[in-house]
Image (cartoon, rainbow, N blue to C red):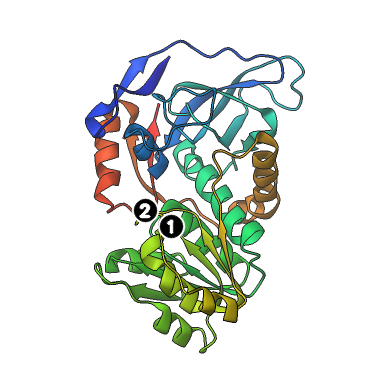
Amino acid sequence: MRAVVFAGKGGPEMAEVREIPDPVPQRGEVLVRVRAAALNRADLLQRRGLYPPPPGYREDVPGLEFAGEVARVGEAVRGLAPGDRVMAIASGEAQAEFVLADPAMLLPIPEELGFAEAATLPEAGITAHDAMVTQGGMRSGWTVLVHAVGSGVSTAALQIAKAMGGTVLGTSRTAAKLELARKLGLDHGILLGKDDPKFAEEVRRLAGGKGVPVILDFVGAPYAVENVAALSPQGRIVVIGTLGGPKATVDLGALMRARGSIVGTVLRPRPLHEKIQATQAFAKDVLPLIRAGKVRPVLDRTVPAAKVREAHEQMEKNDSFGKIVLEF
């Protein structure tokens, strides 16, 4: 089968498409013919040798999510048949023509969606729902601050929060991304400076002077102090990424006075049963919203798998809004 393979550790030039052996489903496994697989920041880090996959997965074959059709089912698999359209997150190796999956991880693709649209949903949607609702405790009608609001996870979180009746504040360094996010329901956009991002004062003003109960952060260290200052009493900061650096200094006194929490979360290295729980929670809460059109895929562009280097170069420019998807 054809698969994206990293020829070594380094820049986008390391990404190429090669022929590798087809996977074979064992008892309790499903073989999926991948039609589309989204690109994620984790793939770029893996290419540079900075984010290896869990044990048992190839370091040179990336891919955290996919959409396609069931090709074969192993023994003891029930409820799935060849031809079923499915999507899922993966621990790795999803950017290939075929991928193995646990049946409990597979979600039905809503009939309204094509494969490329479906491929934008699993990683972004499950991560967003888990971080905001399960880890962050988001409830109907709450206000949430979503950083880097043009990313795949952020656009999913924005739409889920709006479907829950929430108010969404979003930050970006790019005015165009804030404008695009407003079309998805963003209530208030905050344009940040590149060298010294300040947002807490504006967040508190927009939130009626009391701050916000949930903050989703993908940036890390540069936003840490402002995040604490923007919290409402008993609020939670959920750290999903550290694109700006992982080591931060915060005012613990301010955190204590707010009785706030900082929660770290990552999906990929979790044990299978926890991933299944997150997947099923997403299926229960968010799949109905997708079918109703209240949560929509945010597809920036599709790229043939053979042009994977171009896709990596585009993501590294940081000017995409939503997901870049490879088609197989």
> Which quadrant, please, contains the C terminus?
top left
Type of residue at label 2? Leu
Q: Secondary structure at mark 1?
A: loop
Q: CA distance from mark 1 to mark 2?
A: 6 Å
Q: Position of residue 325 (x, y in %)?
A: 39, 39
Q: Position of residue 117 (x, y in %)?
A: 47, 43
Q: Earlier in the sequence, mark 1 or mark 2?
A: 1
Residue at 65% from the left image edge and 28% from the top image edge: 102
Q: Which residue is mark 2?
A: 243
| Residue 246 quadrant | bottom left
Residue 96 in view of the camera? yes
8 left or right of 75 in image = left
Q: Position of residue 208 (x, y in %)?
A: 52, 89
| Residue 225 quadrant | bottom left
Q: Which residue is mark 1?
A: 218
Give the class, few, some or many, for how many residues have Cα within 10 Å of label 1's Cα (few <14, many ≥20): many
On residue 124, which mark appears? none
105 left or right of 77 in image = left
Position of residue 167 relative to residue 241, above or below, is below
Give the class, few, some or many, for how many residues have Cα within 10 Å of label 2's Cα (few <14, many ≥20): few
> Which quadrant, please, contains the N terminus?
top left
Type of residue at label 1? Phe
Q: Secondary structure at mark 2?
A: loop
Q: Nearer the viewer, residue 166 or 228?
A: 228
Position of residue 33 relative to residue 180, above or below, is above
Disc 1 to disc 2: CB gap under 8 Å: yes
